[in-house]
Structure formats: structure tokens, C-alpha cells
Image (tube, grey):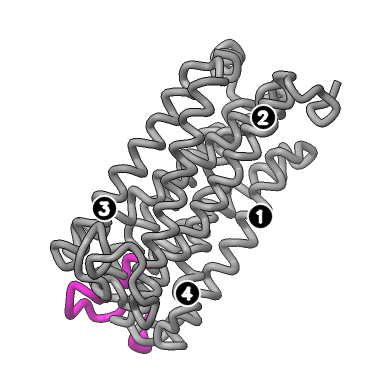
Amino acid sequence: MTPESAGPESPERENIWLHRFAVFTALGTTFLIFAGGMVTSTESGLAVPDWPLSYGMFFPPMVGGIFYEHGHRMVAGFVGVLTFVLAIWVSLKEDRAWVRWLTLGALGAVITQSILGGLTVLYLLPTAISVAHAALAQTFYCIVISLALFTSPDWKRGLPSVRERHGNPSLPWLCVLTTAAIYLQLLMGALMRHTKSGLAIPDFPLAFGRIIPPFDSGAIMIHFAHRVGALLVTAMVSWTLIRIWASYRTHRRLLRPILIMACLVMTQVTLGAFTIWSQKAALITTFHVLTGAMILGVSVLLTLRAFAMVAPEIKARHHLQTA
């Protein structure tokens, strides 16, 4: 019996709708990252000076920067409601205790994120809180993508085991290193945005006409570190692609994510170049932020699949999927 042909009260049908709701929550979070990026790109973070209300209202006039800032708050509120519903649904219908705890972690993260968002406004966009707000956004995104995977019928049935090929590090741990590099690069990007270092180096691909720029200011150092990080991420994604293509290309659950990541990385580099060439045009800059988050999300998905399919400790893998 397939999930679609099961009766209305069957566990299979309940599970597929829970999975679909988790996917919808992940999609909503993707749009939330875009909305938050537009706030920074349009420098609308203080267009609304109070919090949690906006000029003392639930729905202020949506004009100018208020449209981006209050719109971001509305989308964040919607994602918060989705996360709350997901947490309740999982608590009632999910047998795996670790999935229930992970969902509660997502709920705690979205609540903390809303508080950090309020503090960024009340304390006039301090860099530390703004970067923490951006970092937690990426962490929350990773959690909801993981939940979408863990609630999928494919995961619950058990992913096919793949004989591990020789390699150092192993494919799962190579994916971990790649994901960590992407996450750190996003943190550096957030630091660059919130310190207004995005145009500290005004040309690309060179830097002040050189390969290594003169480090005359902290802003230049932050900007150049972000460029170096982009090279590191490109190298790690390329390494992972080569490893999967050489040894696992017949396994679509591993091949498809890394191919998507490779396409997204090429898109991201292009968007980064146009961000500079366009003097940080709002839409281009925001899509640069969004694409970075999507690379991270796909990398998390690939890493989880790699551990489930390729990890040598089969007993530990089985426990992860069935506990």
C-alpha cells in the first residue's frame, strides 16, 4: 500500500501529510531568509523603531522601509506559527523521541530568533546581535530541513546501504567538513553585511587591482576574508562532487544534492560578482544571501543522507533511523 492509496485514518497518510507540512515550513523559512535579506539590503532595519509593535500598531502603513521591516516581521510570525503547529503535530504523532526533541529545538530556536530580532531594533542594530540573529537563522533553517527529511517516507523506510569506498576522510565526514565551511562562510558574510564592508573592496575579481589588497582597514580584511572563504567553499564542494562522482554516482540520493550544490555555488559566485559590480543592488544582494542559505540547506541534506547510507557503523545508522 502506498501513502497516497492509504485510508484517511491510516498512519501512512498521517505521516505523508506531516512530512508535507514540514516541507512547507522549510519553504516558508526559505522565503523568510529572503525577506530578512531585503531588510538589510535596503537598509530598512530601523525603519520601524519599536518592537514588538510597529509604531504602536499591528499593521502600520506599508510604505518605504516599513514595507520591508514590518513585512519581514509578518513572515517571521507566520513561520513561527508553522513551527508551533509542527511541534504540536510531531509531539502527538511521532514515535521517535529524538525527532520530537529536535522539533522542540526548532520551536525554541524560532522564539529565540524573534527575541534577537527585537533586540537588534531596540539596541539600534549592534553588530554582535545582528550577526547572532543571522547565524541563528541559518541554524533554524538547517533544523527544519532536517525535520523535512526525517519525516519523509523515504527516510522512514530506510535509505539503501552503500558499500563505503576508500577515501580519507570518509564521504560522510567530508560532507561534514563541507557543511562547516559553508556555515562559517555565511557567518563571515553576515559580519561583512552588518559591518557595511560589502564594498570595502570595490572591484572584482581583483582587489584594488591586485590579488592581495592592502589591508588598510578592518572592513577590507573582513571583505577579503569573505572572498577567501568563497574559494574554500568552492574547493570543498568540488572535492565532494569529485568523490561522489567517482564512487557513488549511481546513487541518486547522493548525486542529485551535490550536483544541485555545484550549480548553486556557480550561481552564488556570479551573484557575488554582480553584487559588487552593481554597487550592492538590493535584489541581487538579497538573492546572494538566499543562495548561500540554499547551499547550506542542501549540504545538510546531503550530509544526513551520507551518514545514513555510507557510514560504516550500520548498527548506529539503523538506530538513527528507527529510534
Q: Amino acid at mark 3?
A: Ala
Q: Which residue is mark 4?
A: 272
Residue 271 place in picture, x, y as percent: 52, 74
Q: Is residue 200 above or below residue 176?
A: below
Which residue appears farthest toward the top when viewing the image? Answer: 315
Give the crowd class for mark 1: few <14, some 14-19, many >=20 residues within 10 Å: some
Q: Secondary structure at mark 2?
A: loop
**Point 38% across, 81% down: residue:** 63
Which residue appears farthest toward the left when viewing the image? Answer: 123
**Point 36% across, 79% down: residue:** 42
Q: Amino acid at mark 1?
A: Ile
Q: Is residue 208 above or below residue 151?
A: below
Give the crowd class for mark 2: few <14, some 14-19, many >=20 residues within 10 Å: some
Q: Which residues are magenta?
A: 208-226
Q: Secondary structure at mark 3?
A: helix
Q: Is residue 210 above or below residue 144?
A: below
Quadrant location, the N terminus:
top right
Q: Which residue is mark 3?
A: 132
Q: Which residue is mark 1?
A: 260
Q: Is residue 168 visible?
A: no
Q: Nearer the viewer, mark 4 or mark 2?
A: 4
Q: Amino acid at mark 2?
A: Arg
**Point 68% across, 26% down: residue:** 14
Q: Which residue is mark 2?
A: 165
